[in-house]
Amino acid sequence: PIVGAITVYLAWRFFDVPPVMGAIAVPLVFVFTLIAANSTALTAITPTGALGKLTQLTFGVLAPGNIKTNLMTAGITGEVAGHASNLLMDIKPGYMLGGKPRHQAIGHVLGIVAGALAAVPVFYFAFLKNNINNLASDTYPMPAAQIWKAVAELLTEGISNLPVSAAWAALIAALLGILFEAIN
């Protein structure tokens, strides 16, 4: 509860995410962590991007037109679920080498904190110091970030801006996914 409250506060303070929306993102973390852990266990691939898109769709409905809330809540849920799943991938090899799961979890959290303290200032000075609008460029295209941005813009501006062919493709893909899961 304490870390969740801190997360909600930081999302509100730094990214203007309404506290109610931040509070809704916290329970989604638990749901998406279960999904990510299951997916990682079955495929050895952590679906961070896909879970972020699910959050974007959720907050596209809950907070329509709010691009910051859309992106930041997706970052919260996707990253936490991703880190939890990655920790699970580290537990078995660590155990085989004699490490205790508790020590590995503590090391993982320390690594997250240390990485954040180092990466955020470096990223700021390398990419954001002059102008955030120049973030993606030919030198640093950042394709994954462009996808998150495109989804956020689509959900903010309205689904009516989606090309008809893309809507049909999404519908067919969803139906095929349901069919394949039912067959499986």
Image (cartoon, rainbow, N blue to C red):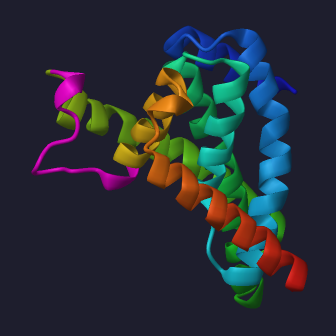
Instruction: Give the x, y percent position of residue 21.
Output: 73, 18
Q: Is 47 left or right of 115, judged from the image as shown?
A: right
Q: Quadrant of the N terminus?
A: top right
- Residue drawn at (17%, 21%) of the image: 131
- Residue drawn at (48%, 39%) of the image: 151
Instruction: Give the x, y percent position of residue 111.
Output: 56, 53
- Residue drawn at (19%, 37%) of the image: 126
Instruction: Give the x, y percent position of residue 100.
Output: 81, 73
74 magenta-colored:
no
Count of numbered circles in the view:
0
Q: Is residue 23 above or below residue 153?
A: above
- Residue drawn at (38%, 35%) of the image: 120
Q: Is 124 left or right of 20, judged from the image as shown?
A: left
Q: Is 34 left or right of 136, judged from the image as shown?
A: right
Residue in the foreground of this view, choosing between 81 and 35: 35
Query: Magenta stretch mostly in which secondary structure?
Result: loop
Residue 121, by quadrant, is: top left
Residue 183, by quadrant, is: bottom right
Residue range (magenta): 131-144
Q: Quadrant of the C terminus?
A: bottom right
Residue in the foreground of this view, choosing between 101 and 132: 132
Q: Is residue 41 above or below residue 58?
A: below
140 magenta-colored:
yes
Residue 56, by quadrant, is: top right
Residue 49 visible (yes or no): no
Residue in the foreground of this view, choosing between 75 and 124: 75
Residue 167 visible (yes or no): yes
Residue, far left: 139
